[in-house]
Image: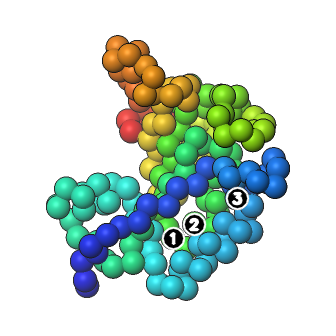
Amino acid sequence: MHNAQRIPVLMYHRVGEPDHPHDIYCIRPALFSAHMQALARANWRAVNIEDFDAWQRGEKSLPENSFVLTFDDGFSGVHDFAAPILKNLEWPATVFLVAGKLGGQSDWEVTTGEPMLPHSLMDAAQLNSLSGQDFSLHSHSLLHHDLTTLDVSTLEQDLHNSRTLIANVCGQAP
């Protein structure tokens, strides 16, 4: 086994039907499946983020053609569309959750200049289902604020509350 020198990190947001033709935050399920199948045919394999973290610290080696697969925000389409595809491949993934919106809608402000409708976010049952399928669940903030604009105290509170909520819902701290 060769040790990987570089590990790509693939990041997706929503898996489902786009809101408009130029929706850069959404991928149709069939296209997501095609991406994963192409990677598999090319002998790439997803590794979990914990192994990636250990690799970054020099504590673990990973084979060539390893990559990390992540999803931002926690959209329901990850559970409904992406998870079955990844389960068939036996690949792990990581979801970075907007913890204060679990089971709700993505009603935060976007600054892309393109319209973005609210979409459903995973609830506790969906997240617990993913936990049993080799998905790691971590924080993407409490309410999807721009963390770079928060003062230190507010930032620390946001991250603490996000971590606590995820731990309460999923039974393990991110």
- At mark 2, the secondary structure is helix
For the residues bearing labels 2 and 1, Cβ distance under 8 angstroms: yes
- 173 left or right, relative to 10: left
Q: Is residue 112 above or below residue 84?
A: above
Residue 120, horizontal then vertical, whole percent: 72, 38
Q: Is residue 108 above or below residue 130?
A: above
Viewer-nearest of discs 2 and 3: 3
- 123 left or right, relative to 134: right
Graded by Cα atoms within 10 Å as few (under 14), some (14 to 19) or many (20 or more), the crowding at tag 3 reads: some
**Mark 1 lies on residue:** 90
Residue 101, horizontal then vertical, whole percent: 61, 28
**Mark 2 lies on residue:** 87
- 65 left or right, relative to 124: left
Q: Which image quadrant for residue 9? A: bottom left
Q: Residue visible at 71% across and 38% down?
A: 113
Residue farthest to the right, as pictured: 20
Viewer-nearest of discs 3 and 1: 3
Is residue 170 visible from the viewing direction of this image?
A: no
Q: Amino acid under label 1? A: Glu
Q: Is residue 55 above or below residue 71?
A: below
Please state the total of marks drawn on the protein image: 3
Circle on res. 54: none
Q: Amino acid under label 3? A: Ile
The residues tagged by marks 2 and 1 sit, at their Cα atoms, a distance apart of 5 Å
**Mark 3 lies on residue:** 27
Graded by Cα atoms within 10 Å as few (under 14), some (14 to 19) or many (20 or more), the crowding at tag 2 reads: some
Residue 133, horizontal then vertical, whole percent: 52, 58
Residue 72, horizontal then vertical, whole percent: 55, 45
Q: Residue visible at 17% across and 61% down?
A: 58
Q: Which image quadrant for residue 156? A: top left
Q: Earlier in the sequence, mark 2 or mark 3?
A: 3
